[in-house]
Amino acid sequence: MTASNDPLVSGLLKDAKLVAGYGRYGVFKDSALFAAIGDAEKLQEATASQPEVVKLQTVLNDCSNTVPFSTLAALRTGWSPGDMSRRTALATYFLIALSVTMMIIIGKLTYVYNRGVSINAELQEIDDNDFSARFGQSIRQVWATKKQLNSATVRQASATDLTLLKDAYYNSVDSLHSLDQRFSSLLVRAQGFMTQEAPFPIWGMQWGYCKLSASPAKAGAPPDFSNPRQIAINQFCNQEVAPAQQQSGAENSQPLKQSDFDCRNSDNGQPATEVVSATDPAAKAEDLNADFDEATRNLQCEGVITITPNSISTLTLQAKTLSEVLSPYALWILPALYGALGGIMFHMRMILNPLLPNPPLARLIHRIALGGLAGMILAWFMAPGTKLGGEVTGIGFSLFTFAFLFGFSLDIFFTILDQFVSMSVAGIKKFGTSTVA
């Protein structure tokens, strides 16, 4: 066949030959395309209206189910199946490195989120079980048992009674110390999580933050107290000693604790007793409070406890701000990353098939971004009543798994969105319609 003057026919023949060449790798089950190309080439002056050309177009359209347009577009640019050029190899290595990096980052952030959820659950358990009241009762029990033991020692009770009282005293001390250590350890973990682990989950983030935010301290220059935020940043990054440690006349390098002050200024841990009226109810209540304070102070000086019952509620409220730290992880960061990882896995699966062309960089980035957006939007649908700082600990792997699946298959995500749009349109059309009884 001579070259056709009709650009539509010549372009059709060119595309058909490209698809036929692709079909040599066992893609097609019959030779209908080859026969249609042969019939069209036998024409002397081919036009778009001739039956052979129309048949070629029909057969080529049938091949679109096997050879999608993206593959045809790649064939037009010179790509061939099984291409192992340097560019293809670099693209493959880049995608592998990106996927491994994403998996490491997601694994680290998921671990941080699960750790925060665990700490939050322990804080919630302490709050539900009225830990402050239990702690105060344990202090009273230890103090009362100690008084009984001292009284029995003074009146020279029998050895059996003293042994029983000592066992009761030591058991109560062990129980109180266990409660104190449990809460103190939980508080340290919660504060460390909120100040370091959650804000800087990736290696090097804290170093970069300190390099960019902390101001270098000049030798011999006094600290600038006019900017409290900068002072806090410098303290956090260990570039400046605490202002409390720089005050002149301080005896020690560490600020004096309240418990140390009480222990140093009391007479061997036994404060002076005050005579009160036994008939005045207010005096009795004040005497009980003073006795409880004395017990708390004495146990602090002996190292049995490190916290006071009055501070437990305040410390618990401070630590319960953990939900505000977990909210971005549950609603934005992790769903987006899992969706993006699903998009990367989709393209990695395509690369494993030598009959499919590798996606260009722009398309790859677009697909990953869409996967991340799909994960975030899914979080909005699955947790519509959750707001920043709200209860987000119930969000877990169910959401993250669906975010990954939606990122891997965007068709499912857009199908669901289309269903929502159709339902919304149907609901809007019902506005203003009369209801027949």
Image (cartoon, rainbow, N blue to C red):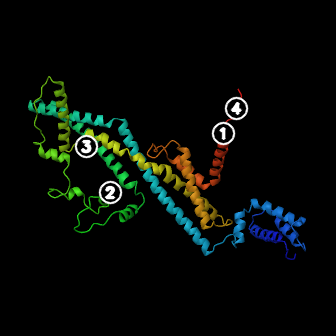
User: Is residue 419 placed above or below 33 in the rendered structure?
Assistant: above
3D distance between C-alphas at marks 3 and 2: 28 Å
Apparent side of residue 396 relative to residue 196 in the rendered image (left or right): right
3D distance between C-alphas at marks 1 and 3: 59 Å
The residue most toward the bottom is 2
From the image, state whether disc 3 or disc 2 is nearer to you. Answer: 2
Q: Is residue 96 visible to us here?
A: yes
Q: Which quadrant is the N terminus positioned in?
A: bottom right
Q: Amino acid at mark 1?
A: Gly
Instruction: Describe the element under mark 3 as helix, strand or loop.
Output: loop
From the image, state whether disc 1 or disc 3 is nearer to you. Answer: 1
Q: Which quadrant is the C terminus positioned in?
A: top right
Of labels 1 and 3, earlier in sequence is 3
Apparent side of residue 317 relative to residue 374 in the rendered image (left or right): left
Instruction: Describe the element under mark 2 as helix, strand or loop.
Output: helix
Q: Amino acid at mark 3?
A: Ile
Instruction: Describe the element under mark 4 as helix, strand or loop.
Output: loop
The residue indicated by pointer 3 is 307
Of labels 2 and 4, earlier in sequence is 2
Apparent side of residue 291 relative to residue 126 in the rendered image (left or right): left
Q: Quadrant of residue 120?
A: top left
Q: Quadrant of residue 296?
A: top left
Relative image position of residue 111 (x, y in whole percent): 44, 53
Of labels 3 and 2, earlier in sequence is 2
Q: Residue at x 38, y 55 (%)?
A: 197
Relative image position of residue 99 (x, y in whole percent): 54, 62
The residue indicated by pointer 1 is 427
3D distance between C-alphas at marks 4 and 1: 14 Å
Q: Which mark is residue 434?
A: 4
Q: Quadrant of residue 419?
A: top right
Apparent side of residue 253 relative to residue 51 in the rendered image (left or right): left
